[in-house]
Image: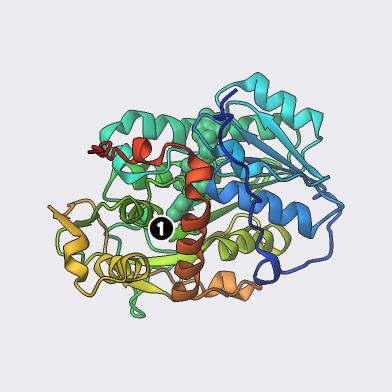
Amino acid sequence: MLIDDQLTKVPVPTSGAKGMTVFEAQDGLCNILITGGGGFIGSQLAYDLAETYPDYRVVVFDLFNYKGSLNNLNSHVHNLSIFKGDIFNDEDLSTALMAYSIDAVIHLSAQTSVDASLATPYESARANVVGTNVVLENCLKHGVKKFVHMSSAEVYGKADVGEEGVFREDVSPRPVNPYGASKAASEMIVHGYQNRGIDTFIVRASNVYGPKQFPDKLIPRSVTLLQHGEKVTIHGTGEDVKHWLYISDVSNAFNVILHRGVPGEVYNLGSHYASTNYNLCSSIIKAITGAPDIEQWMNKVPGRAVVGKPVGLGFSKLEGIGWTQKVALEEGVEETVKWYRDNAEKWWGNLPGILGIPPRKSC
Ligand SMILES: NC(=O)c1ccc[n+]([C@@H]2O[C@H](COP(=O)([O-])OP(=O)(O)OC[C@H]3O[C@@H](n4cnc5c(N)ncnc54)[C@H](O)[C@@H]3O)[C@@H](O)[C@H]2O)c1
């Protein structure tokens, strides 16, 4: 059993009215498999697709190798199935693709962190490049018709910026860290399968946040550190700018691309909402501590040399097929802070252990 029996299950939040655009159900798109579907983005997408399209079957394919991830799928939905498997195992993939006669695969499974990729770059390349190749080869073998690949805005790095001051899909990627490089390489693998009987789609997303994200990422990590009386970590002066997307908007982007996407295209999934890390952490500190002196809750550490240009993505191509960003940063952060405040301990179990917070001495 992977999940601590003592975890108290709480209902999975669904995107509800804020979420999915409803398209007419498509023939040939009845059975959808999501690799990495037990993770933050995949589990939300799985519920949103299953609830919006009762005639589709959604199959979550995941290793479920970190604590709490099974909690992401604890609500019963009649047309959602869960398959525990490894994308590197041909037999696991073949079995799942055949058993559910899969029409479309959304490939989210990956090594997902810049820091982890710096520590273990070969593992990052294996998970993201070779892993994508294994999934695609199995899709080809089993007649999958659509393959939607999750890449990242990290592929742009120090790429050229057009006159509008944003990265457009047609600029050449120039990643600045192993994670971005592995995602850029994985895109080339995907392009190699278009025109071989599979329609491929690539999504380059900005930073995603929301309930249920593993608490090693900036927003959930800052919330949980503060809840345990610890300071948030600020790299350098905190002037790094990031563009933020709330989870329900990301879920809907996959829905739009599945139903309206043009085969072979790359879609930027960008955001109207940008913030410096300093400002974002300040608003979280204010929400949790109410303290007038924000800086006393900041632990400033040296900056990182592996960040790209602080510009956003141009995403008019995605808007052109029907996607709009619905959730503002302030609203999304408020909901996220509330969810972690109410649920995080029950969801993840030993949060101080996960975040490396030393146990407090009781006197
Ligand atoms: N979260 C973000 O801000 C963001 C931004 C841009 C792109 N992305 C991309 O989106 C995708 C999903 O990210 P996430 O934030 O949901 O990450 P996550 O870590 O929450 O989910 C990844 C899931 O993949 C599963 N997985 C890993 N290796 C596997 C394997 N060998 N076989 C089967 N399953 C495996 C993990 O168990 C996990 O459930 C990734 O490709 C990531 O690079 C994320």
Observer-nearest of 278 and 269: 278
Amino acid bearing label 1: Ala
Observer-nearest of 280 and 157: 280
Q: Is residue 172 above or below residue 62?
A: below
Q: Would you say residue 262 is visible in this rendering? A: no
**Which quarter of the figure is the C terminus placed in?**
top left
Q: CB of residue at label 1: within 8 Å of ligand 1? A: yes
Q: Is residue 170 above or below residue 353?
A: below
Determine the image quadrant of residue 265.
bottom right
**Which quarter of the figure is the N terminus placed in?**
top right
Q: Tell me, what colour scheme is on the image?
A: rainbow
Q: Is residue 49 left or right of residue 7?
A: right
Residue at 53% x, 48% y is: 40
Describe the element under mark 1 as helix, strand or loop.
helix
Residue at 30% x, 57% y is: 157
Q: Residues within 10 Å of mark 1 (few under 14, many from 20)?
A: many
Q: Position of residue 196 (x, y in %)?
A: 66, 40
Q: Would you say residue 286 is visible in this rendering? A: yes
Q: Is residue 336 above or below residue 36?
A: below
Residue at 50% x, 59% y is: 210
Residue at 62% x, 26% y is: 85
Determine the image quadrant of residue 273.
bottom left
Residue linked to disc 1: 153
Q: Position of residue 285 (x, y in %)?
A: 30, 66
